[in-house]
Image (cartoon, helix red, strand yellow):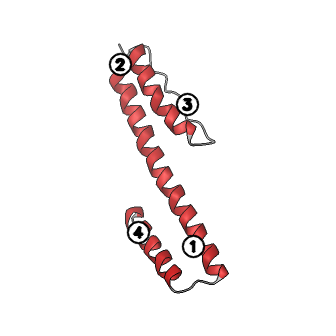
Amino acid sequence: MNAKFLLPVIAASSVFLAACGSSPAEKQIEAQTAQIEAQADLTVEKKKTVKQYKECVMKSKGNETSLKMCEALLKVVNGNSAATVKPVTLPATIN
């Protein structure tokens, strides 16, 4: 299943369960579901940002000013994650 389709289905299910007077176990499942959905959204955004960073680096063609602007994208990704993405080093042949 596509993640874009699955997330709304899970969210709708969570709302439905909450409306029916949830037990403590159901409330725990709802909380876990919300946490998983938030993590999935964050992962999608990180992937988009890393893709933008890679495109930015390729467009910069080694220009230091442009590369510094690209690194701002990495700071966004690394600021929201324990894992870090390392800057791309361009080959010397790109000018």
CB within 8 Å, label 1 to label 4: no
Badge 1: few (under 14), some or many (20 or more) residues near its Cα, within 10 Å?
A: many
From the top left corner, tell me how far across and down residue 75 is, in percent. 52, 32
From this view, report whether residue 35 is shown above or below residue 94.
Answer: below
Q: Which secondary structure, mark 2?
A: loop
Identified at 41% across, 69% down, the residue is 8
The disc at residue 8 is 4
From the top left corner, tell me how far across and down residue 45 is, in percent. 44, 47
C-alpha separation, residue under disc 1 versus residue under disc 4:
14 Å
C-alpha separation, residue under disc 2 versus residue under disc 1:
48 Å
Identified at 61% across, 76% down, the residue is 27
Disc 1 marks which residue?
A: 30
C-alpha separation, residue under disc 4 versus residue under disc 3:
33 Å
Residue type at mark 4? Pro
From this view, report whether residue 49 is shown above or below residue 1.
Answer: above
C-alpha separation, residue under disc 3 versus residue under disc 2:
18 Å
Badge 2: few (under 14), some or many (20 or more) residues near its Cα, within 10 Å?
A: some
C-alpha separation, residue under disc 2 versus residue under disc 4:
40 Å
Mark 3 and mark 2 lie on one chain; the one further toward the N terminus is 2
